[in-house]
Amino acid sequence: MINAIDSELTHPDVVVPTNVAAATPNSVGVVKTQYFEFDEPLALASGQVLERYTLAVHTYGRLNADKTNAVLICHALNASHHVAGISADDPKEVGWWDNMVGPGKPVDTNKFFVIGVNNLGSCFGSTGPASTRPDTGKPWGASFPVVTVEDWVMAQARLADRFGIERFAAVMGGSLGGMQALSWSITCPERVANCVVIASTPRLSAQNIGFNEVARRAIITDPEFHGGDYYAHGVVPKRGLSVARMIGHITYLSDDDMAEKFGRAQRAPSEDGAWRYGFDVEFEVESYLRYQGEKFSKYFDANTYLLITRALDYFDPARSTGGDLTRALSPSKANFLLVSFTTDWRFPPARSREIVKALLNNAAPVTYAEIDAPHGHDAFLLDDARYHAVVREYFKRIDKGLLHG
Amino acid sequence: MINAIDSELTHPDVVVPTNVAAATPNSVGVVKTQYFEFDEPLALASGQVLERYTLAVHTYGRLNADKTNAVLICHALNASHHVAGISADDPKEVGWWDNMVGPGKPVDTNKFFVIGVNNLGSCFGSTGPASTRPDTGKPWGASFPVVTVEDWVMAQARLADRFGIERFAAVMGGSLGGMQALSWSITCPERVANCVVIASTPRLSAQNIGFNEVARRAIITDPEFHGGDYYAHGVVPKRGLSVARMIGHITYLSDDDMAEKFGRAQRAPSEDGAWRYGFDVEFEVESYLRYQGEKFSKYFDANTYLLITRALDYFDPARSTGGDLTRALSPSKANFLLVSFTTDWRFPPARSREIVKALLNNAAPVTYAEIDAPHGHDAFLLDDARYHAVVREYFKRIDKGLLHG
């Protein structure tokens, strides 16, 4: 039953044969992770300093001679640098935006050199809480510094320096990835020709922060969290992490989408056909959420979950301009593409329109598409024809040089 | 800080001086709980039988000679029989619908005899999981039978028999209480003259069930749950219960309401005025949710939370008519008042309209009000002038005999 449900969904972390098959024909192929070491200390927004760190990176396509065709893809909460193609380590692992990035795809790797980078504090190869702390020889755990979207941008900018990329043709991301793209356009305006912000927001609402806080409480109050130093105890706070993921999942899907996928369908009626009443899994939606929660708790680091939800909470570029988003965005010199989805109740279209309005106030060049899609926040990861057509045409214009600043 | 937040809210389980003051002038006054013992076995929907049980009850006003002025108030997830007035045991405890029920209030106790009853399986005096199981002499714990909305109605009907009430002038409730009122009109059509269903739904959506499931998982996976027999261990699964309550709270409030109450306000800036970055409580909304969660975990029984959320999940009167709500409601002989609130995203107006449409299909007399209130699902508990005017006028018509069937 669980398999049947999963095969209907193309959620990025659900690895099923249909995904692999979809990846093969028009894929960037098998990709190996590259590791970049940085020894120059990174001063973080919190005031702490990260003395040295590693970034795990994928690249797809070829950087042209004048290094003007680079696209940076920023990831959201639970994703990684593995944006497209098939992992060299595991052929079942397909990139989370494989439908978007590849040869002939909306972000066409025949034209563009695409970089995916795992963010600091994450758990897919870049330095994070599970990494060894140099001065103690033990995992960072709870002592890993709080990181912000702006910190990630600084680290990504140093990665760009390594490639010799002075200016990205585009910086692009969905959700938290869109926040990074937006931050790039403000903090490194000379280095971003195009800024692509999908299903994002200029700041979390109180409700968004509330959901993050409940997820964090579930993790922190799990007795196996051990104040963040669960590595030393040989355990993981899997119960808390599972609950956190279940909460997240509900907020990623629209009410209608859940209704269509699961409705009130009950599992396995009893043999006599009578209704059952109990506390086991009774409804399909429970089965799905439990499965997602348990799977997530086996591969994702709990401290990373805490760090990244905090980065989401803190993101608010207008904080330094007294809440004036127009002024906050005024340094930007990029062309913008914004996309939102009508049924996204996590970061609804109104939040994207706030950004569009602020950009228009600054007379910035902005294209905005509001896609009538049923899939809630997750729509940004799915293969919607109208959505992909918008991104495809935008990148064609970039390629033709029409949108170079 | 917590007090400052609480005093702004009139949430039913937040007991603050302003509430007490508000309760005094037009209150039913000090009320004592009455306990009714039932020895006749109750056959439950699950097939199990409850041999004997107790119901905790409040009454307000006086039953008239022909016993035609009785109003039954049904409670929602975390409430009780304490609908109005001040508890005889604790003068700080004010009824959860004190603004609705009392002398001169919309449900006027100068006219009506109002009954509040704590449901089976709850934890405020009626038989529930924390009660002693007669055959073992120990708490029921996880062995307490699953109860449904229909089971509650049967138990409430027996209570009505004790009072000699053949037919209620009205059965009324909000949220889960509205489901009970609706169920009364179907299962005991001769006994309900008026059915008042506020901020309710004919069935939970997949999203509603999803949130319930996450809350249950938080409780069940708390190591101090001990399979539901935590009483024997002298502990309570307070961490899980706290997380469950936090999730609930977010779904009771509207996004706008949370924005207005908390926004992105951060607590206690550091002395040098610099932004702080950390995992302590940073935002007001976190402080509020944590406080609510912890307070709830101290007085509410975890097994009751599981039972009542399951009763919510299972409620679906149209299940027995192949999904046809019109046919499911056809036995009803009541007049109906339905009220919904525009910003209620838990049980939005569209769900109430489904009920209204089914009633109109049956040519049932129905009044429907959709109140443009900013407070989300919680609006049904608050003192909104237009909402209260609708209920007041409806009960005036009941009193004048206009709506007697």
Image (cartoon, coloured by chain):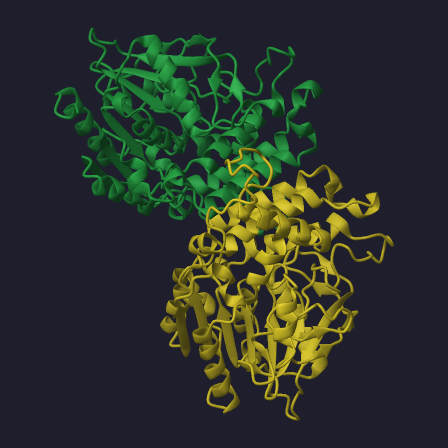
Chain colours: A yellow, B green
Query: Which residue corresponds to the image point at 57% horizontal and 39% vertical from the top-left?
Result: A271
Residue A213, image x, y percentages? 57, 45
- Looking at the image, residue B190 lies above or below residue A285: above
Residue A222, image x, y percentages? 69, 39
Residue A80, image x, y percentages? 66, 66
Query: Which residue corresponds to the image point at 29% horizontal and 9% vertical from the top-left?
Result: B164
- Looking at the image, residue A299 lies above or below residue B137: below
Q: Quadrant of residue A14?
A: bottom right
Query: Which residue corresponds to the image point at 86% horizontal and 52% vertical from the top-left?
Result: A136
Query: Which residue corresponds to the image point at 33% horizontal and 22% vertical from the top-left?
Result: B73
* Residue A404 visible in image: no
Quadrant position of the C terminus of chain B in the picture: top left
Q: In the shown orientation, is residue A195 left or right of residue B326?
A: right
Residue B94, image x, y percentages? 39, 19
Q: Quadrant of residue B20?
A: top left
Q: In the shown orientation, is residue A348 left or right of residue A284?
A: left
Residue positioned most to the bottom? A65
